[in-house]
């Protein structure tokens, strides 16, 4: 009887796989274009401040994440309108971090990622000199600025991109000191190596638990760390590595593999991930932003032969199918985007029709995931070191 039930379950699983229609790269790109067009139409002037309870300049972190996604989209869909939209934004803010040169808040440094991306395309020093001044200032202060896991995504890639541009290892070294302090020392260490997931911040001293007693790991918080690690690996691996750079690379790669295994276990049957990763009873519904970031990281790992395609490709296929069919409205609006916050309980309920407080970062996350998945559907790149 047990053998019969097992065989039946296997048959049903195989039927599901056979009935799944594999998307083409062109279909993925068409969806990404639609989602991006919705946002650019909704925000025709990228210089206008945002108004959510109060006014904020448009180079705040939520918009910076959108531009990360837009730069990724430009990499597979090089339309002049994307660069025009980006340069209007950057020129308005004088390619300056949000705040002053003495800015130490990672959220306000996040825009530097796009500034440096544009510098690498143009060689225009205006696009990188203010970022460099800001990083040089911060490196002269202290290590312990990244007191929440999101900060790793906001600022780690700024430092590693600067290393990629200049070859000056001081930038990568300082970033990795900041990363390991957050990873190992802050509140006892935000990274749980055993479970491969991150606690959210210094206020959630591990172990932080949900009401049912399970550990509370916030989907988007872990997604921020996951994508930041991917970007840092890309940057550090872009140059011949010294012994020190190779040590940094090995640690990041090891953390990426730990996270990948953990995230694979957390994926929902429908392809998305819960806001609370390991707790289906508390905030166990669909959520797009974390899911898109996980798709981005896993797709990158497959393309660079860090992750097994046999094991992780089905997870990416299911994630994309759910994102494209369950989350994208006909006009390109994105459902199931959890608004700003710092834990699974924030900005609830997360639903198909609810507008989050900020739409820009959700679009950015979606584009990051879509672009890496698009590339999976293209010829695979060579393995990284």
Image: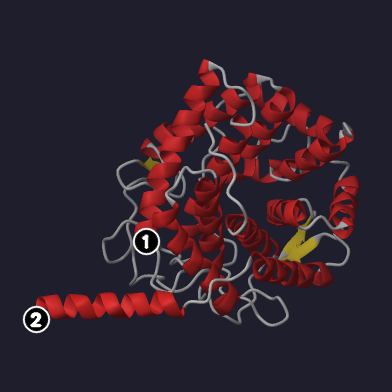
- How crowded pointer 1 is (Cα within 10 Å; few <14, some 14-19, many 20+) is rated as some
In the orientation shown, which residue stands out farthest toward the top? 243
Q: Secondary structure at mark 1?
A: helix
In the orientation shown, which residue stands out farthest toward the left? 1
Please tell me which residue is depicted at 51% across the width and 30% down the height of the picture: 249
In the picture provided, is 87 more to the left or to the right than 63? right
In the picture provided, is 306 more to the left or to the right than 332? left
Please tell me which residue is depicted at 63% across the width and 20% down the height of the picture: 169
Q: x%, y% of residue 20?
A: 48, 77
Callout in the foreground (2, 1): 2
Residue position marked by numbered label 1 in the rendering = 266
Q: x%, y% of residue 105?
A: 65, 40
Please tell me which residue is depicted at 76% across the width and 28% down the height of the picture: 132
Q: x%, y% of residue 202?
A: 45, 43
Q: Which mark is residue 1?
A: 2
Pick the quarter of the image with the N terminus. bottom left
Q: Which mark is residue 73?
A: none
Q: Secondary structure at mark 2?
A: loop
Instruction: State whether residue 89 is above or below residue 115.
Output: below
Residue 216 picture quarter:
bottom left
Colouring chosen for the image of the structure: secondary structure
Instruction: State whether residue 312 is above or below residue 382.
Output: below
Q: Is residue 343 visible?
A: no
- How crowded pointer 2 is (Cα within 10 Å; few <14, some 14-19, many 20+) is rated as few
* Residue closest to the eye, 158 or 304: 304
Instruction: State whether residue 66 is above or below residue 171.
Output: below
In the picture provided, is 250 more to the left or to the right than 102? left
């Amino acid at each position: 009887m047990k053998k019969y039930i097992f065989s039946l379950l296997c048959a049903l699983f195989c039927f599901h796989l056979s009935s799944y229609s594999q998307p083409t790269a062109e279909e993925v790109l068409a969806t990404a274009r639609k989602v991006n067009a919705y946002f650019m139409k909704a925000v025709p002037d990228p210089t206008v401040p945002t108004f959510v309870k109060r006014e904020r300049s448009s180079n705040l972190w939520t918009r910076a994440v959108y531009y990360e996604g837009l730069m990724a989209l430009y990499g597979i869909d090089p339309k002049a309108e994307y660069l025009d939209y980006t340069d209007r934004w950057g020129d308005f803010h004088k390619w300056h971090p949000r705040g002053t040169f003495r800015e130490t808040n990672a959220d306000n440094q996040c825009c530097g990622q796009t500034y440096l991306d544009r510098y690498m395309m143009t060689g225009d020093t205006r696009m990188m000199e203010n970022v460099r001044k800001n990083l040089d200032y911060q490196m002269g202060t202290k290590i312990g600025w990244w007191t929440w896991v999101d900060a790793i995504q906001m600022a780690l890639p700024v430092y590693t991109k600067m290393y990629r541009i200049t070859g000056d290892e001081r930038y990568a070294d300082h970033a990795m000191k900041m990363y390991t302090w957050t990873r190992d020392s802050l509140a006892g260490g935000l990274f749980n190596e055993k479970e491969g997931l991150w606690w959210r911040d210094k206020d959630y001293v591990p172990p932080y638990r949900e009401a049912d007693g399970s550990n509370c790991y916030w989907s988007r918080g872990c997604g921020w760390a996951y994508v930041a690690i991917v970007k840092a690996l890309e940057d550090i691996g872009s140059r011949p590595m010294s012994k020190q750079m190779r040590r940094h690379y090995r640690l990041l790669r090891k953390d990426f593999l730990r996270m990948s295994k953990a995230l694979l276990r957390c994926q929902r049957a429908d392809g998305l991930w819960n806001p609370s990763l390991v707790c289906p009873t508390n905030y166990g519904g669909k959520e797009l932003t974390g899911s898109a970031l996980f798709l981005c990281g896993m797709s990158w790992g497959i393309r660079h032969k860090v992750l097994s395609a046999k094991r992780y490709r089905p997870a990416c296929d299911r994630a994309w199918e759910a994102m494209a069919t369950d989350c994208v409205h006909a006009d390109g609006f994105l459902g199931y985007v959890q608004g700003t916050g710092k834990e699974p309980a924030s900005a609830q309920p997360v639903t198909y029709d609810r507008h989050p407080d900020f739409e820009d970062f959700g679009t950015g996350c979606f584009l990051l995931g879509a672009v890496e998945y698009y590339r999976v559907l293209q010829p695979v790149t060579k393995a990284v070191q």
